[in-house]
Image (spheres, coloured by chain):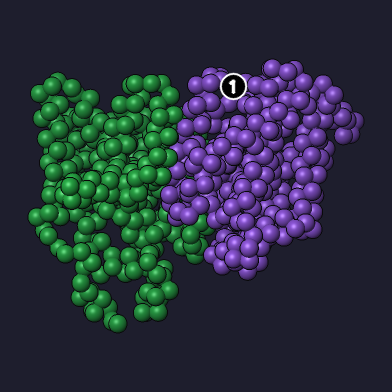
Chain colours: A purple, B green
Amino acid sequence: MTSTLFLVQVLNGLQLGVLLFLIAAGLTLVFGVMDFINLAHGVQYMLGAYLAVAFYGAVGNFLIALLLALVAALAFGLLLDFLVFRHLYERDHLDQVIATFGVILFLNHAVRVVWGAAPLTLPVPDFFSGSVALTDGQLYPVWRLVIIASGLAIAAALYALVNFTRIGMLVRAGATNARMVSALGVNIKRLFMIVFGFGTMLAGFAGIMIAPIISVEPGMGDNILILALVVIVIGGIGSIRGAFVAALLIGLVDTLGRSFSIDILRLMMGPSPARMAGPAIASMLIYVLMAIVLYLRPAGLFPAKGRLR
Amino acid sequence: MTGAALTAARPSRPFRPAREAALPASIFLLFALLPLLAALTARQYLLDIGARMMIFAIAALALDLLVGYGGLISFGHAAFIGLGAYAVGILSAHGIGDALIALPVAVAVAMLFASLTGIVCLRTRGVYFIMITLAFGQMAYFIASSLAPYGGDNGLTVAARNTIAGWPLLKSDRAFYYFAFVCLLATYLFCRALVASRFGRVLRGAKDNAVRMATIGFTVRRFQHVAYVLAGGLGGLSGFLLANSTEFVSPAYMSWQQSGELIVMVILGGVGTLDGAIIGSVAYLLAEEWLSGLVENWKVIFGSALVLVVLFARGGLIGLAGRFARWFSHA
């Protein structure tokens, strides 16, 4: 294990981390403020990627495609909210899980009908298509750095938004006690819609940004959704700060675990059992982490202050 | 109030044995007669579908114990099916193909997993419980897909159906069907008795108000833990049957989508009614069979139907039927 390889993997872990944060931020807010489990959040990520591919095919410019896809993702999210989700806010969690599971099934297969089951690709924008040299001979793709930078920038903006603006204050208050906020005369429905739309857009943005480096295919949102759920549970539901810390933690643990588990196990056992157990342990690592965190702190690392549930 | 007084508490609905038994009796009668229909119409595949329905009905019954009676929404129930199935597959790969060994092992492994994970899961409540059961389900899934000697991602083929004490009794599809039938019947009666017992009352009481039950003097978590382990064991039984039915074991049995589908079965039939769990799994598999023959991407239709059921048909199919019956008797 060389230090350069380690650096590359840390960057990859960060990239996964900020991606998870973009998805988890919306999920945890919707969850925290509206007490609504939206399993269909991962589908927004998938849609973002598909819309980016579609608009890029139409206009041929990544930046314009990005903006159009963002707007379309937002519009679609609000449409889903209007048609389905809005009617679930007052229901129990079981109903929410089932209905949003239905939305996942529907959209995963609707995407197949519209765009086909074969994976699609999106070229990396020309301006960012190169690589930079980390050290001599060790290149790293610029686009991944762009993802990390934009993710961190959004995290910072979100931090400012939540902590220093009026709307952010309402969101924080809503995560603590939505009914009380409503009783104080705040239009809670409008607040819900803003939070939901914002979360949708962040997930769509994550999908758009990742589209150039992975294959865009039906069901791509499912696995990332599970990871995002792990993130918000570890971070504490309703807490943006928790989501950020947990997202980076999960991103790093997962990536580093996958790259170095065999090497580490080899220190303890023979090479062939290490090669067998390594990948198994690596893919379990984050779930074990989650189990430990929940065992010690059943409400996550940074539970939203004063949250009753 | 003491435990004895609780046992003596009146059931919430007037008890009408004939009426209560009519629905399950007709369900089981239909299941019992299905092979006859298959033979008469020379549609052998009906046996296959019927067995599948009963196998998933067992898992759905177990899940209904947790969700409907315990208020514990487990999103990792497929893991138990998978563990039971893998017990059969792995034993068979080592030349042990007898149900007298495989069945107890399948159930025991699932119960052990439930017991260990239950310690952690039951510390949490509500949404966190959903998530952590999901996480443990995923863990089991990843362990299974990394079992390289046993097929890894691709799964493994079971050499032959289990024998019973050396006799190849399950070899014929019809015999296997009736074996699954007996298992389902036994599971149903067991769950029925469990729900009606003092244990079941405590479980339901804790669903409504855990604090109240704790104040009365019950260690709620211990009751929930036992329910969780029992449901796990029944999941293992279902997995044992599934592996024998398909003669194939794969990590896909434990995927989170499979867990979701199990919840759908329970909800579709009507949560907290054991009959509903069976009806739900029958309805789900029928819909799958029918729609998948109709269009390639049948889940587009199924997904939207699911949303509509949640939005407009609260209480599932049983609730819908009940409302329909009331509307009918008023008119």
Rendering coords of residue B320 (x, y %): 28, 46
Q: Residue at x 72, y 56 (%)?
A: A168
Which residue is under mark 1?
A: A119
Specify the subunit that label 1 lies on: A
In-image side of A7 versus A203 (left or right): right
Farthest bottom residue in view: B1
> Looking at the image, which is closer to me, B272 or B219?
B272
On screen, residue A191 above or below B11: above
Pick whichever, A132 or A188, lies toward us. Answer: A188
Circle 1: element type: loop
Task: Give the residue drawn at x 57%, y 54%.
Answer: A34
Taking the spot 39% from the left edge, 35% from the top edge, the residue there is B305
User: Quarter holding the C terminus of chain A?
Assistant: bottom right
Side (left or right) of B104 relative to A243: left
Q: Amino acid at mark 1?
A: Pro
Q: Quadrant of the N terminus of chain A?
A: top right
Q: Choose between B3 and A41: the one closer to the eye.
A: A41
In percent of width and height, residue A268 lies at 64, 48
Residue A303 point in image, percent of width and height: 63, 63
Residue B290 seen in render: yes
Whether residue B131 is situated above or below residue A300 in the rendered picture: above
Furthest residue toward front: B331
Q: Quadrant of residue B36?
A: top left
Residue density around tag 1, few if under 14, some if 14–19, many if 20 or more, within 10 Å: few
Query: What's the residue at 79%, 58% (across, down)?
Result: A164
Residue B107's x, y, as percent? 32, 50
Q: Is residue B93 left or right of residue B120?
A: left
Q: How many marks?
A: 1
* Viewer can see residue A256: no
